[in-house]
Image (cartoon, coloured by chain):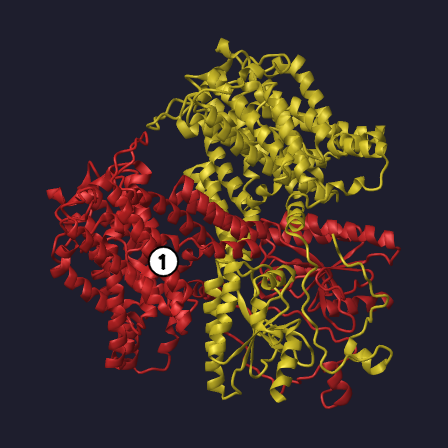
Chain colours: A red, B yellow
Amino acid sequence: MGVNSNRVDHFDSHHPTIIRISNSDPPPPPPMEIHRVSLPPHRSTLRKLGHRLADVFFPDDPLHRFKNQTWFMKLLLALQYFFPIFQWAPHYGLKLLRSDAVSGLTIASLAIPQVSVLCSEIQSMCALFLETEYALFLKKGISYAKLANLPPIIGLYSSFVPPLVYSLLGSSRHLGVGPVSIASLVMGSMLSENVSFTSQPILYLKLAFTATFFAGLFQASLGILRLGFVIDFLSKATLVGFMAGAAIIVSLQQLKGLLGITHFTAKMQIIPWSWQTILLGFAFLAFLLATRHISLKKPKLFWVSAAAPLTSVIVSTILVFLLRDKAHGIAIIGNLPKGLNPPSTNMLYFNGPYLALAIKTGIVTGILSLTEGIAVGRTFAALKNYQVDGNKEMMAIGLMNIAGCCSSCYVTTGSFSRSAVNFNAGAQTAVSNIIMASAVLVTLLFLMPLFYYTPNVVLAAIIITAVIGLIDYQAAYKLWKVDKLDFLACLCSFFGVLFISVPLGLGIAVAISVFKILLHVSRPNTVVLGNLPGTQIFHNLNQYREALRVPSFLILAVESPIYFANSTYLQERILRWVREEEERIKANKESTLKCIILDMTAVTAIDTSGIDTLCELRKTLEKRSFQLVLTNPVGNVMEKLHQSKILDSFGMKGLYLTVGEAVADISMSWKA
Amino acid sequence: MGVNSNRVDHFDSHHPTIIRISNSDPPPPPPMEIHRVSLPPHRSTLRKLGHRLADVFFPDDPLHRFKNQTWFMKLLLALQYFFPIFQWAPHYGLKLLRSDAVSGLTIASLAIPQVSVLCSEIQSMCALFLETEYALFLKKGISYAKLANLPPIIGLYSSFVPPLVYSLLGSSRHLGVGPVSIASLVMGSMLSENVSFTSQPILYLKLAFTATFFAGLFQASLGILRLGFVIDFLSKATLVGFMAGAAIIVSLQQLKGLLGITHFTAKMQIIPWSWQTILLGFAFLAFLLATRHISLKKPKLFWVSAAAPLTSVIVSTILVFLLRDKAHGIAIIGNLPKGLNPPSTNMLYFNGPYLALAIKTGIVTGILSLTEGIAVGRTFAALKNYQVDGNKEMMAIGLMNIAGCCSSCYVTTGSFSRSAVNFNAGAQTAVSNIIMASAVLVTLLFLMPLFYYTPNVVLAAIIITAVIGLIDYQAAYKLWKVDKLDFLACLCSFFGVLFISVPLGLGIAVAISVFKILLHVSRPNTVVLGNLPGTQIFHNLNQYREALRVPSFLILAVESPIYFANSTYLQERILRWVREEEERIKANKESTLKCIILDMTAVTAIDTSGIDTLCELRKTLEKRSFQLVLTNPVGNVMEKLHQSKILDSFGMKGLYLTVGEAVADISMSWKA
C-alpha cells in the first residue's frame, strides 16, 4: 500500500529534551528547525479510486492468504474460503462430535415447541395489526384442504433445510439457525397489511415464500457486492428499542391467548372464555418465569430454562390428553401432518400486482434478519476469539434462504436464543446445526402425532417468557447515561414500533441515527488550544486546566472535516472566536491578537466549499490585519489544498507541521 | 463559556530542546514526565444540552452586543438588530445617495424588460413540461377579462413591493431584489403539473400567490427557528450543476420564441413561421452576445452589457412600431395595463384540494430562492468585507414574500444578475433598492403604453444571453480537479434537472452530497504513524517519507468519530493493520510487535457502539498478547469513556496524552 518501510533501529525511550543534554552523539537540531509539511506521494486518479474502492469494499483484504501459494493450494484455499466446512472438516473427530451432538439435540428440543410458537407469532402480529381472523384460521389451518399442510408446520420445516445449508457455508461455529421473531413479526405485519390471509391463503403463502426468496437474494447480493456496511446503520441503540417495542406488542397479543380469547372484535366485545385455559396458561407462565429466574441467578443452571419449554410442552400435552373429555374449552394444536418439507418452487410468485410487496417485504425482513444473524455470530465469535466474515455470513444466510424458499421454509437467520443455548451446551462446530436438522427430520417423519394434544395456551406462555427477555432496560439505561442521542434513537424505535408500525419505527430510528451524524458534521466542535507549560504540547484549554494561552496567538482546532454542510458555520464560528478573544484581551489588557493558528489535525477531509471557506476566511482576517496559519493538514487535505492552488495564497509562512513550530517561528519573525 | 483564562507571560520562541541547553532558568522536566489525560470539567446534562443547543442555533451569539448596555441603548440595539436600516440611516448622506441613485436606476432599467422575460420564463417552462397553451395564453392574457390585469405584469409588480420591504429588514447592502429564474422555473413546472393554466387560470394564479405566501412563511420560520443550516446541504457543486441544467432547458425553450414558433404540438408538427421574426431575433441575440463578450473581456465596460437589454428593448420596440404595417408575423407584448399592484389577499387559497400542492410548491421555491438569495448576499458581502446574518436574511426574504403575496407579487429573492449590476454600478446601501422600486413605480403609473410594440422575440434573445452566463463550466472543471464526488453531485444535478425534473434532480444531488458524508463516516481513514527523527512528532508514514517506524510498536491514527456506522469496519481494519504489520515484521525479521497505540486525536466523537468496539478490540488484542493503548482522547470522548467505565479495563497504563510519551513510557517499562 505504498507504506514507508524505513525503520529506526533504536528509539530513545527518554524524553528527547533530556537525552540531548546527557548524550551528544546525535547532532542537535539547528535552533529553528521547521519541518516542511509534505504532500503524500502522487498517485493517479485511477489508482486513488482503486485504493478507495478496495478500502470500501474489501476492508479485510480477502486475497492476502493467496499470496505466494502453489496453484493446488490456491484452489484448496478458495474452496475453504467459499465453504468454511473444508477448513475444519479434516480435523473433525469423535470428541468434537460428542460436544456437537449434545448441543444439537438441545437446540432441537428448543426448535420443536417453537414450531407453533413462531407461527403463532406471525399470526398474532397479523391479528394485532389488522384484526383479521388469521389467528383463528391458523389453528383450524389444517381443515383448509387447498393449503395442504403448510402454515403451522413452516416453522419446523425452517429448522431443517436452512441449518444444513448454513453448516456448509457459514463462518460462525456457534450460530443456531432458525426462524427468528423479528423477521417473523415484520413479515406477518407487512404481508397482512395488503393481503388478507383469510380470504386469499394461497396468495399469502406464495408471497411469504417469494419474500423469503427476495430476502435471500438481497442478502446474498449484499455479500457478493461486499456492501455489508449498510447493516451498520441499524445501530445497537435502535435494535434495543425495537426489540423492547416488539416484545411488548407480542406479549400483549399473547395475553389474549393466555386468557383463552380467540380474537378481539372491532368493538372489543368480550367473548366467553374458559377458566381451564386461564389456569393452565398462568400455571405454565409461572413455571417458565421461575425457571428463567433460576437460570439468570445461577448461570450454571442454564439448562433449567433451556429445558423448560420442551418440558412444558410435554407436561401440558400429557395433561390435556388425560383431561381430554373434561376440558373442551382448551384449544389444542390438533392434527399436524407428518412428512418432510414439500418442494415449494411452484409457489414462487414472479409477476402480478403483489410482486412489489413481496420484494419490499423480502428486503426489509432480509435486512432485519441479517442484522440479527451477523450480530449474534459476532457476539459468540468474540467470546471464543475467532473472526466471522460479514460478507461471507451474508452469502451463507442469503443462500440458505434461497434454498429455504424452495422447500417450504420462510426467512431464517442466526437466532440469538438458539445460538446462546447452542454455545452453552458446548457446540464446537457447525455440526451441531446438522445434528439439530437430523433431530427435526426424525420428528417430522415419525413424532408429529405426539403434538396433537399440545394446548395453544402453553405456546402463548412460552412466547411471553421468551420475549420478556428481549426487553433490555439495562442497556437502555446505559445508553441514557453515555449518549443522549443514542437513547433518543432507542426511544423512538421503541415508541415507533409500539404505536406506529415496525418499518416506520425502524425508519425513524435510523433517520435519527443518520441525523446525529449529520448534526455532528454540520455543527462541529471548535476548541481553543493552550500550551502545556514546559512542553511543545498544545491542548484544549477547557479540558486541560494547566494549559496556558499564548499571548498574541489564538490557536483553534477544528474537530471535523470541512464540508459544504459546515463551511458557513465554521467561518462564522471562527470569526466569533476571534471576536471573543479580542474582547477578552481588551478586558484583561493583554497584548493584542496578531495571529490565528488553525490546527487541522482533526480535519480529516475537505471539499471545494471548505477550500473556498478557508480562502475567504484568510481574506477576511487579513483585512483586519490578522495572520491566518494552518498547521498539520493530513494527507488528502494537503493534496486538495495543493490541487486548488490555495497554498500559493497562504505562502511559505502560512503552513506549519506543528502548532509549536508555528508559534516559535512566528514569534521569532515578530522579534526580528 | 468556561474557558480557562490563565495565560503564559512569556512564551519561549525557540525550540524548547535548544532553549534548555543554553538557558537553565526553567527547571528541566523530570526524565519521564508523563502528562495525565484530563477529563473536561463536569457539567450537568442540562447545561451540556443548553451549550450544545446554543451552539447549534446561535453560532453567532446574537446577544453579545447587548452586554453592559443601558436600557435605552439596548432598545436601540434591538431596533437596529431587527431593522438594519437603523444602523446606517443616521449616517446616510448625499454622497451615498448619488451612488445609490445611479445603481438603483441601472437595476430598474434591467427590471423593466425582465417583466415579460421572467413571465415568459414561467410560461416557457409550463409549455415545456406539459405543452399547455400557457405560452399562447400569456400573450393574449389581457383578453381574459376575469383575470383582470395579472399575468404578464406580475414580474414588474414583484420588482416594486418586495425591494421596499427588503431595504428595511435586509442585512446585505448590495442585494438586488426581484424575481429569479430558478424559483420562477420551479413554480411554473410544479404548479402546471397539476393545474392547467389554460382551463383554470384563476385557480392557477391563486395557487401561485398562495405558494408565495407559504414560501415566505417557510423562509421566515427558518429564520425565527434559527434553522438556517438546512440550506447548507445544497452544496455549491449541486448549484453549479443545477444552474447549467436549468439554463439549457430555458435556452432550448426560448429557441422556439427565437424561431417564431408559438408552441410545439405533441407531434412536433412544424407550423409556419415568419422570416422577420427570425431575423429580428438573431440580430438582437448577436448584439447582446457581442456586448456580453465586450464586458467579459474588459470589466471596466460592464455598463455595455448592463445597458444592452434596455437598449435592445427600446430599439426593437421603435423598429417594430415603424414597421407595424409591414411585419404582421412578429408577435408583440401588446396592451400592458397601467396602475399599481392590486391587492391580492382575496386570492390566497387556504382550503380545498390543491392546498397541499401550494404548500409543497411554496416550500420548494422557498428553499431554492432562499439559497440563491443568501449565497448572492454572502458573495457581495465577502467582496466588501462585511457580514450578512443568514437567519436575519431568511426573515427579511420571508417577510418580503409574505408582503409580496398580498400585493400581486410572486416569489422574489436576491437575484444574482441584478445584484451584480447593482454592485458594479456602485451601490452603497439598500437605498438602491428603494430607488429601483420608485423607478418601477413611475413605469407602472405612466410608462406602460410604451411597451405595446415590444416584440416577444427580443425577450427570448435577452433570456438566452442571460442564462448562457449561468453555465459555469470552469467551476465544473475545478470540481473535477479537486473533488471527484463533488463533481459527481454536480453532474447528477445537471442531468437530473435536464432529463428528469427539477425537484428530483436536486434531490438526487443532495442525496449524493449526504452519501458522501456518510461514506466518509462509515469508511474512515486509518493511517500508520511514524516518528520524525529527533523529535517527539509522530506523523503519517505515507505522507512523510522521513518518518520512521518505531520497533515493536504499531501506531495507528483513526481519522473519524467512532460511530455505530463505522465501528465494525474500524475493528476489522485495525485487526488487518495488525496482521499486515506482523507479516511485514516476519518478512523483514524485525523485533516482534508488542504494543498497538491508537491515536485518538482525530476521533472527535464516540457513541455506545464505538465504546463497545474499543472494549472488544482490547480483549481480542490482549488474547493475542498485544497491549492496546489510547492516546489523546478529546474532551467529549474522554467524558464518554469515563461514563461507560471502560477506562477501568484499560487501566492506568492504557491512556497517554501523546504518542511520544506512550512510546517512551512503555519502552521504559519493557526495559525494567
**Is residue A114 rendered to the left or right of residue A506?**
left
Q: Is residue B641 visible?
A: yes
Residue A639: x and y in percent read 59, 63
- How many numbered marks are there? 1
**Residue highlighted by disc 1:** A290
Q: Is residue A538 above or below residue A463?
A: below
Query: In the current view of this chain or complex, which residue is farthest to the right?
Result: A589
Residue B197: which quarter of the image?
A: top left
Q: Is residue A616 above or below residue B392?
A: below
Is A463 situated left or right of A443 in this image? right
The amino acid sitting under disc 1 is Ala
Tell me if mark 1 has few (under 14), some (14-19) or many (20+) residues whose alpha carbon lies within 10 angstroms of its own: some
Provide residue A158's location: percent of width, then percent of height: 23, 57
B131 vs A5, nearest the viewer: A5
Residue B506 sits above or below residue B179 on the image:
below
Judging depth in this view, the residue of B595 and B639 nearest the camera is B639
* Residue at (47, 81) in percent of width and height: B582
Q: Position of residue B560 (x, y in %)?
A: 56, 61
Question: Judging from the image, what secondary structure is the residue with disc 1 in?
Answer: helix
In the picture, measured across the screen, residue B287 lies left or right of residue B501, that is right
| Horizontal relation, residue A148 to residue B93: left or right | left
At 46% from the left edge and 66% from the top edge, which residue is drawn?
A51
The chain ID associated with circle 1 is A
The image quarter containing residue B105 is: top right
Res B259 seen here: no
Q: Is residue B512 above or below residue B196?
A: below
Which residue appears farthest toward the top when viewing the image?
B145
Task: Give the image quarter of residue B273.
Answer: top left
Q: Position of residue B166 (x, y in %)?
A: 69, 28
Q: Nearer the viewer, residue A564 or A580?
A: A580
Which quadrant holds the C terminus of chain A?
Answer: bottom right
From the viewer's side, name the closer residue of B627 and B377.
B627
